[in-house]
Amino acid sequence: MRISAAHAISVLSGRWLAIICAAMLLAACASASYAPSSGGPRFAPYRGDVEVLERLPPHGSFTRVGVVEVEGNDFTSHWMMMRQLKQAAAARGADAIVLQAPLNNPDFYTKKGAKIAAWAIRRKR
């Protein structure tokens, strides 16, 4: 079986492209941190979809679980950072988060050290 030079180059290029993409995904990881509210109750992990709210609900209709923060690296998308915020909040029993500041350019990738912080809350139903 004879393989043409063009075919060999395309196969190798495809492999290198896959390696480069994998390296970029690893570099794009973000790290999440959590600070619990002092004296607040602890909740079992929330299994639903964590909702992103524009502002805190009326006083008395929720419990503050804590603050979640995500720090991105180069090429971390805001979407990925929001996903990690929601996962960190859900792991602590929150069913909603409220961003502490609006996102700047939410459709773009971040630079190393970019942070997003949110209050993790559990609404009373």
Image: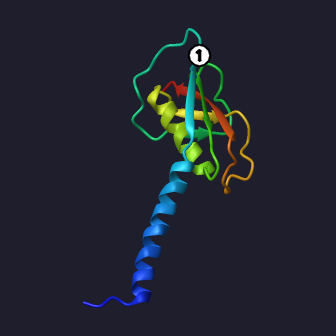
> How far from the left and from the top, in percent, is residue 11?
40, 77
Dot 1 crowding, Cα within 10 Å, few <14, some 14–19, many 20+: some
Is residue 30 found left or right of 11 in the rendered image? right
Which residue: 68% across, 44% down? 112
Locate the N terminus by quadrant: bottom left
Q: Is residue 122 above or below residue 49?
A: above
Observer-nearest residue: 115 or 94? 115
> How far from the left and from the top, in percent, is residue 32?
55, 33
> How far from the left and from the top, in percent, is residue 17?
49, 68
Observer-nearest residue: 27 or 30? 27
Q: Is residue 107 above or below residue 101?
A: below
Dot 1 lies on which element? loop
Q: How is the image coloured?
A: rainbow
Amino acid at the residue labelled 1: Ser
How many discs mark residues in the rendered view?
A: 1
Instruction: Determine the residue located farthest toward the top in the rendered image.
Output: 39
Which residue: 56% across, 36% down? 31
Is residue 66 found left or right of 116 in the rendered image? left
The quarter of the picture where residue 36 lies is top right
Which residue: 65% across, 26% down? 58
Observer-nearest residue: 52 or 71? 71
Q: Is residue 96 above or below residue 36?
A: below
Q: Which residue is mark 1?
A: 37
Which residue: 69% across, 39% down? 113
Observer-nearest residue: 88 or 41? 88
